[in-house]
Image (cartoon, coloured by chain):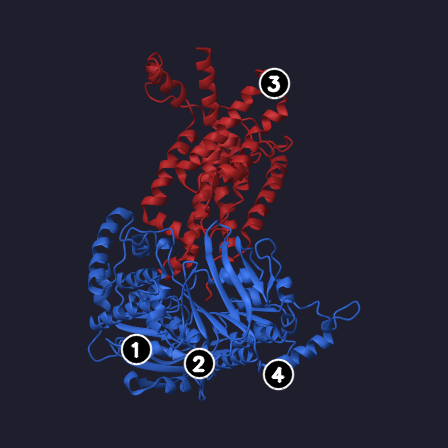
Chain colours: A blue, B red
């Protein structure tokens, strides 16, 4: 069956693999794609880059049949086609690796690949055939993964290979990858790029959607830049630079490197000793972690998502009970093993910018001025003798929004009406405004536009320069490398090493993040 | 010999009680494996029990009654699917609504049609499912042990008991060995994966609900036209919920679910036996306590002894295609 699809979709020589002509799409008031036209050559790796909300995912969803364009035409190998659903897309040889993997965790790799193309009513017959075909694909494209392991037990890098195998098994000639490296270590990303190059060399076409400039420059042949739903530029990758692409994405000059002076560390503000956190399922998430954060320095915690950073932050901020260990803020013991009280931690001078702003940082259904006082709602400033002083809250929130350049600056809007970057600025304003001694910051720029990233980074540096102790947890290595004065690497719940940023390279950090010891790195 | 007779009668009673539980639990298995929580097993059984008894009473045919019971149960299953799949409604509310509606509607229609206080007329002869003697059952009766087991325990049940017995291996095969089963399990775990694989989530869930309806329909018909000889108000008496408990105890797998149903049915058979019988040391235990045994057992099993029961992950969550 896979072979049959393949032969149908085999491209004619001259025509581009995919051609989009005048694609237009609106979601209510949002104009997600504006007359987008795009040609993608057969046997190339084509990057599509743009900020969040630039319309790149919408465009690819239209190509994959998730949405229907309001206007415009899709041509595959020169022929106009209608793609009404993902089944049509697959039949035209288009495969997609989604940002959130579309896998069934308890199923084996083989079962996941077979789902939807089982090859007959009984599984046994199709399984033998699928196994043989998959072994061939694995050999051809360096996609090694054990076919009989349940997918849920595989690390994310291998899960991604399963997604690629799924697409290839269905005869994909054009492979779309949506932000594929977000969950990978640099080494896993490099391996992915090798796979993509192997695919290209075999004549497949790869479309890579990303907001990371490094990846575009490293692996693509051509790159299309999108901004506000429209294509603003197309370049041959070798003729462009990081700076040019960033400027095209944002629409103005952007400082990619944060400018900062050397840190002047003061006395220890946060002292963590032997901290261990066991989660509800009995899994040890944080294992015997010890470190200090001094006034006037940013300590960055690097690591692949899910290696205990979240639990560490939650324990330090008083959201989650630690099983053992001590935490001292400015010398006073916090008792993190027997009480969980975020308010008491705040009283000691701690501010927390949580990793997931929509779940933990804000109530998106609230008005912005209500979100802006969460956790501080009993502050005298906001309360009259009996009732809350709404006018004053709105007034103060409006002033904060001005200071932090939140747009649109209307405190009465629903929090959900703000973009990710502006929501994050509301959280930062709330937490930084208390003049805390210690800042815990989790993933400050996740899902935030480049322009806002620049702003947030400058604010963090300013807090450091004002003598605050900052603990920064981020899965973005660039962010850690450019902001942190000291870098700790977490792997499997432990701090596996400390590196000075001057000595740190992505390679070295990447190896440590994957569990190799510091010495080996 | 006396103990053997007691044993045989307990086993017979166990099978009789287990039959509707097995059928309903398997129905629930299809529903929940597809990601639809079906608390309405009870209502579907009750509706089917009424329809089967009513049609059997009028037509004099148990088979026609069975067909009517299945039809009503499938219709109710489709209502549930329409609310919870097509319109992403709350599945517990929809299931509960069906239970309450049927509990009121069946006796009301019964009063209107048969004027016997909400019951249906007593069924006799071909209007009931009667015991079937399997081949050679009489001949083998005299063969010790094997022959006796065959003739006393395996032979001599009605058709629906055998349907229930066959439904277990059939379901195990369907769920784990076929394309339908792979998609069914996938749609209950991660419907997005099924959707991107080009298979319709709604279609799979509707099919699962139809299967659920068929099985609950047979279970309901069994209650009123095989186990008893008439429809009686609230005759399911919580069996739908007990079936759900058995499904959880059986970890959403056919064979363990059968085991759980047999266990529940066995405690029920034993409790009937124990009523009024003086026990050593404690004497006669009040009947109410004895009758509570199966339910206490259910709570205990579900509370602690099952281990971690991992439900299909998408169970109860409407599939909404947004990103």
Residue A39, quarter of picture: bottom left
Position of B310 with respect to A399 (left or right) is: left
Where residue B123 sits: x, y (%)?
A: 53, 26
Q: Nearer the viewer, residue A196 or A432?
A: A432
Q: CA distance from mark 3 to mark 4?
A: 79 Å
Q: Nearer the viewer, residue A75 or A497?
A: A497
Q: Residues within 10 Å of mark 1 (few under 14, many from 20)?
A: few
Location of residue B280 with respect to A94 vertically, above or below:
above
Q: Residues within 10 Å of mark 2 (few under 14, many from 20)?
A: many
Q: State the SS at label 4.
A: helix
Q: Nearer the viewer, mark 2 or mark 3?
A: 3
Position of A97 with respect to B243 (left or right) is: left
Q: Are marks 3 and 1 in contact (CB under 8 Å)?
A: no
Q: Nearer the viewer, residue B312 or A273?
A: A273
Q: Are marks 2 and 3 on the same chain?
A: no
Report the residue at 48% width, 44% height from top: B74
Q: Chain of mark 3?
A: B
Residue under circle 1?
A218
Residue under circle 4?
A402
Instruction: Please report whichever mark, 4 or 2, sits nearer to the chain's N-terminal start.
Output: 2
Q: CA distance from mark 1 to mark 2?
A: 25 Å
Instruction: Please report whichever mark, 1 or 4, sits nearer to the chain's N-terminal start.
Output: 1
Q: Are marks 3 and 4 on the same chain?
A: no
Q: Chain of mark 2?
A: A
Q: Residues within 10 Å of mark 3 (few under 14, many from 20)?
A: few
Position of A317 with respect to A61 (left or right) is: right
Q: Residues within 10 Å of mark 4 (few under 14, many from 20)?
A: some
């Amino acid at each position: 069956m896979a072979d049959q699809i393949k032969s149908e979709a085999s491209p004619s020589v001259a025509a581009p693999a995919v051609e989009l002509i005048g694609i237009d799409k609106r979601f209510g008031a949002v104009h997600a794609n504006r007359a987008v036209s795009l040609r993608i050559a057969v046997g190339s790796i084509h990057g599509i880059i743009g900020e969040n909300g630039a319309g790149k995912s919408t465009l690819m969803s239209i190509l994959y049949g998730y949405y229907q364009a309001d206007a415009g035409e899709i041509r595959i190998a020169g022929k106009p086609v209608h793609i009404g659903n993902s089944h049509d897309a697959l039949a035209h040889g288009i495969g997609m690796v989604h940002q959130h993997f579309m896998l069934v965790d308890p199923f084996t790799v083989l079962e996941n690949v077979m789902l939807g193309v089982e090859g007959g009513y009984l599984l046994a017959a199709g399984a033998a055939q699928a196994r043989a075909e998959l072994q061939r694909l694995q050999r051809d494209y360096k996609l090694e993964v054990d076919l009989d392991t349940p997918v849920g037990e595989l690390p994310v890098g291998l899960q991604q290979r399963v997604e690629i195998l799924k697409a290839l098994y269905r005869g994909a000639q054009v492979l779309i990858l949506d932000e594929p490296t977000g969950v990978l270590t640099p080494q896993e990303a490099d391996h992915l790029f090798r796979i993509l190059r192997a695919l290209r060399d075999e004549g497949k076409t790869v479309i890579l959607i990303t907001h990371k400039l490094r990846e575009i420059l490293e692996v693509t042949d051509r790159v299309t830049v999108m901004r506000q739903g429209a294509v603003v530029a197309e370049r041959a990758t070798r003729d462009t630079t990081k700076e040019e692409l960033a400027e095209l994405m944002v629409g103005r000059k952007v400082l990619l490197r944060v400018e900062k002076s050397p840190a002047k560390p003061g006395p220890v503000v946060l002292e963590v000793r032997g901290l261990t956190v066991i989660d509800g399922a009995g899994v040890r998430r944080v294992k015997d972690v010890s470190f200090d954060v001094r006034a006037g320095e940013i300590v960055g915690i690097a690591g692949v998502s899910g290696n205990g950073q979240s639990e560490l932050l939650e324990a330090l901020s008083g959201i989650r009970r630690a099983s053992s260990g001590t935490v001292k803020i400015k010398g006073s013991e916090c008792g993190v093993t027997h009480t969980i009280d975020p308010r008491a931690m705040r009283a000691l001078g701690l501010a927390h910018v949580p990793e997931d702003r929509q779940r933990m940082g804000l109530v998106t259904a609230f008005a912005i001025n209500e979100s802006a006082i969460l956790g501080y709602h009993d502050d005298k400033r906001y309360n009259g003798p009996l009732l809350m002083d709404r006018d004053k809250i709105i007034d103060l929130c409006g002033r904060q929004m001005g200071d932090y350049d939140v747009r649109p600056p209307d405190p009465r809007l629903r929090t959900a009406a703000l973009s990710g970057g502006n929501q994050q600025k509301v959280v930062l304003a709330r937490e930084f405004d208390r003049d805390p001694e210690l800042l815990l910051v989790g993933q400050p720029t996740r899902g935030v536009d480049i322009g806002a990233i620049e702003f947030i980074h400058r604010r963090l540096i300013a807090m450091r320069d004002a003598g605050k102790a900052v603990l920064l947890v981020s899965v973005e290595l660039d962010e850690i490398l450019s902001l942190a004065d000291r870098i700790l690497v977490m792997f499997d719940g432990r701090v596996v090493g400390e590196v000075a940023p001057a000595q740190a390279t992505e390679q070295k950090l990447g190896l440590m993040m994957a569990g190799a010891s510091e010495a080996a790195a | 010999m006396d103990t053997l007779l007691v044993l045989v009668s307990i086993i017979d009673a166990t099978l009789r009680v287990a039959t509707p539980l097995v059928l309903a639990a398997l129905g629930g298995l299809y529903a929940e494996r597809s990601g639809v929580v079906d608390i309405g097993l009870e209502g579907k059984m009750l509706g089917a029990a009424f329809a089967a008894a009513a049609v059997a009473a009028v037509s004099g045919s148990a088979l026609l009654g069975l067909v009517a019971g299945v039809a009503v149960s499938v219709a109710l299953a489709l209502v549930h699917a329409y609310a919870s799949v097509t319109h992403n409604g709350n599945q517990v509310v929809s299931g509960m609504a069906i239970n309450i509606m049927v509990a009121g509607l069946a006796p009301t229609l019964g009063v209107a049609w048969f004027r016997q206080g909400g019951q249906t007329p007593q069924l006799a002869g071909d209007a009931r499912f009667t015991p079937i003697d399997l081949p050679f059952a009489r001949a083998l009766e005299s063969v010790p042990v094997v022959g006796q087991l065959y003739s006393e325990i395996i032979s001599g049940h009605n058709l629906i008991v055998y349907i229930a017995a066959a439904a277990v291996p059939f379901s195990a095969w369907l769920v784990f060995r076929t394309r339908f089963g792979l998609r069914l399990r996938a749609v209950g775990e991660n419907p997005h994966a099924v959707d991107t694989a080009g298979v319709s989530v709604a279609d799979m869930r509707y099919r699962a609900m139809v299967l659920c309806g068929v099985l609950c329909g047979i279970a309901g018909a069994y209650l009123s036209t095989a186990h008893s000889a008439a429809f009686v108000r609230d005759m399911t008496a919580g069996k739908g919920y007990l079936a759900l408990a058995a499904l959880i105890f059986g970890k959403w797998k056919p064979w363990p679910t059968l085991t759980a149903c047999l266990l529940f049915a066995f405690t029920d058979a034993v409790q009937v036996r124990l009523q009024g019988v003086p026990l050593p040391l404690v004497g006669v235990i009040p009947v109410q306590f004895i009758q509570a045994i199966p339910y206490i057992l259910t709570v205990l099993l579900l509370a602690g002894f099952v281990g971690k029961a991992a439900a299909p992950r998408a169970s109860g969550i409407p599939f909404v295609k947004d990103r």
